[in-house]
Amino acid sequence: QDPANPGTWNINVFMCRGRFENNLAQWTMRICDFLVDAQGWSFLMCSLCNMGDQGQFRGQQLLFRWDGDKRNIPVSTTSWNNTDSNKMEVPDYWVDEKVRSGEMVMKQVVCTLEERQALQEMLDSTYKRVLTRDRAPDDDAPEDEEMPYRLELEAAFRSEHRALWYKYQDRRERDPVDEVYLPKTADPVTCVVERLQPGDGYLYHGTNPSSAMSILKTGFNMEHAGSATGTMFGPGVYCAEASSKSDEYGRDDGGNTYPSLCAILICRCFIGKPYVVQQAGAHVDTARDQGFDCVIGDRESAAKTYKEYVFFEEASVYPEFAVIYRRQYVKEQVPANMAVKATGTTGRFWQMKPDKYFKNVAPEVNKILIAAQQRGDTVVSVQYKGTDYTFNIQDKIGINRRTGNQVPLRAPMHI
């Protein structure tokens, strides 16, 4: 509290990125949630004004009213009133005594150094620099890179949740495991991987930091399945065994608590008996009807991209870790084995086929071709690294004017 101005508080939680992006809206909602849900006040109005020569400063006023202590305070629609979950044993690595005793249902704890190292090793060992069209442009990426070289862990939290753990164990017991299917996250074996039970596997789910922390508290909701990324293999909770695949769906909070940082949930999943397919389609109903526990869309075998795991029961996925991470685009700052060239495409580049496969043209050439296409030009000449090329946009042919060699071109799927 400011002693010189009674009723005024100074706080240091506000952050900004650039001149205009800040986390004021997020902290406004936190204040509203606290006063309304926790203290029982009524929210009346919010007024604000932008100041400064370019409107870069913001003044804001919130008005609440105390209606007495008889007001009904809204409660969460999620109920964890399950006495059975209080009777079950919890993992021996859980540390919160109130959760272990059943006094509390859940707690998010900060990961130990050993856990953080194990999670970083998992992120690294399953990272492939393979682009797909699901990768959105990143404003923080350099112009000559579409994909980071590494995901660097900045913070990690582990969920100790009696109710979700009870649901997960109950789901496991319904389908005993005969054969174990191991995802790529099973190797190398770390202190985290050693905790798994037969039929389990750690899988990734990309999101933003706020959503990640929220899902740790509530679990996944099948009503929202596919609402953000679609349902290529049928409705369900989509996870991946490659951290680079889930990074395609990673987002930041727009300058809030973790500016410029994204999030991945590392979930303990009951893979059990998987139904493996290679082509898109409504496979979930077939898998469920035939007694499978999940669907694996194996696009790695079909298109050299990634495998995706689809779970059609909420209880099959226990969101255990939330990893807050930074995308590292400087190859000199990553381990040597990770400083490799990206393959595949996001669909935003013109491509040429010099041999068996199509490859992205250089970023500077791509900009020229896109601009020519938008102008309606059919032929454009480009000099790249001292060599003159002619690109026939209409006929999709590229010509090396020095050698006369011609190669097929392929236009971007979207610009």
Image (cartoon, grey):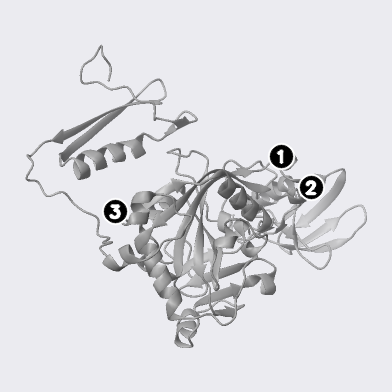
Where does label 1 land, which residue? Answer: 333
Q: Is residue 332 left or right of residue 155?
A: right
Q: What residue type is labelled 1?
A: Gln
- Residue ID for mark 2: 382
Image quadrant in which you'd find residue 77: bottom left
How packed is label 1: few (under 14 Cα within 10 Å), some, or many (20 or more)?
few
Q: Give the side of residue 20 with respect to residue 392, left or right.
A: left
**Are the two marked residues, 3 and 1, in contact with CB atoms closer than 8 angstroms?**
no
Q: In which quarter of the image is the C terminus?
A: bottom right
Quadrant in the picture for the N terminus? top left
For residue 182, side relative to residue 269 (left or right): right
* Gap in angstroms between the C-alphas marked 1 and 2: 33 Å
Q: Earlier in the sequence, mark 2 or mark 3?
A: 3
Q: Is mark 3 on a helix, strand or loop?
A: loop
Residue 68: where, in percent of width, then height?
7, 39
Q: Which of 144 and 2 is in front in this view?
A: 2
Q: Is mark 1 on a helix, strand or loop?
A: helix
Disc 3 target residue = 103
Give 61 or 325, whichever is nearer the viewer: 325
Q: Are marks 1 and 2 in contact (CB under 8 Å)?
A: no
At label 3, the amino acid type is Glu
The tag earlier along the polypeptide, 1 or 2, is 1
> How far from the left and from the top, in percent, is residue 301?
69, 73
| Res 216 → quadrant | bottom left
Image quarter of residue 133: bottom right
Task: Say whether residue 298 is visible.
Answer: yes
- Residue in view at x 37 percent, y 55 percent: 100
Which one is earlier in the sequence, the residue at label 3 or at label 1? 3
Q: What element carries label 2?
A: strand
Query: How many labels sit on residues?
Result: 3
Three-letter amino acid code at the position of disc 2: Val
Query: Which is in the foreground here, disc 1 or disc 2?
Result: 1
